[in-house]
Amino acid sequence: MEDITTHELKERLDNQEEVFIIDVREPHEHEEYNIGGTLIPLGQLPSSLESIEDHKEDEIVVYCRSGNRSGAAKNFLVQAGFTKVRNLLGGMLEWQEEFEEPEF
């Protein structure tokens, strides 16, 4: 499935569309800033498949800091049989750059 841009995801979230989001960063990164995704660090994804099995046919968006780890997560999930996985292009770096007010 085609990846998703920060603008597309933000619009869908603003419209309160149902999207299952997984944050594959580490807990400290998630605590610093997140967009409400379920935290499953990339290293724990293989052992966490059972907990997300109900979403196998649902659209899933995975995100990380820049899009690299979530790209690997997408590939892993697709190989595990998840059918609608999308990587958030640019990750939280781009999200914050696009949508967060600068602090002065």
Image (tube, rainbow, N blue to C red):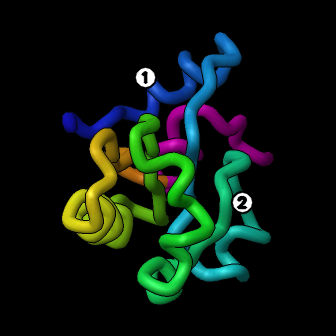
Instruction: Classify 10 Å Cα crowding around label 2: few (below 14), some (14-19), many (20 and above).
Output: few
Name the residue: 45% across, 45% down: 61
User: Is residue 91 visible to the viewer in this orientation of the structure?
Assistant: yes
In the rendered view of the protein, which quadrant contains the N terminus?
top left
**Mark 2 sits on what residue?**
33
Query: Magenta stretch mostly in which secondary structure?
Result: helix
- Disc 2 marks a residue whose amino acid type is Tyr
Query: What's the residue at 44%, 54% (across, down)?
Result: 62
Stretch in magenta: 92-104
Q: Nearer the viewer, residue 26 or 39?
A: 39
Q: Residue at x 55, y 17 (%)?
A: 11
The residue that mark 1 highlights is 8
Measured in 3D between alpha carbons, the distance from the residue under mark 2 to the one under mark 1, in whole angstroms, is 19 Å
Residue 32 on the magenta span: no
Q: Pick whichever of labels 2 and 1 is earlier in the sequence.
A: 1
Residue 68 visible, this orientation: no
Residues at circles 2 and 1 in contact by the CB criterion of under 8 Å = no
For label 1, the crowd category at 10 Å Cα-Cα, with few meaning under 14, some 14 to 19 and many 20 or more, is few
Quadrant assignment, res 75: bottom left
Tag 1: amino acid? Glu
Q: Is residue 77 above or below residue 60?
A: below
Q: Describe the element under mark 1 as helix, strand or loop.
A: helix
Lateral position of residue 103 relative to residue 57, left or right: right
Q: Residue at x 20, y 65 (%)?
A: 79
x, y (%) of residue 101? 71, 36
Q: Residue 13: x and y, percent?
A: 63, 24
Q: In this rendered view, identify the residue nearer to me: 54 or 64.
A: 54
Dot 2: what SS? Answer: loop
Locate residue 4 relative to residue 22 in the image: left or right: left
Residue 102 lies in the magenta-colored region = yes
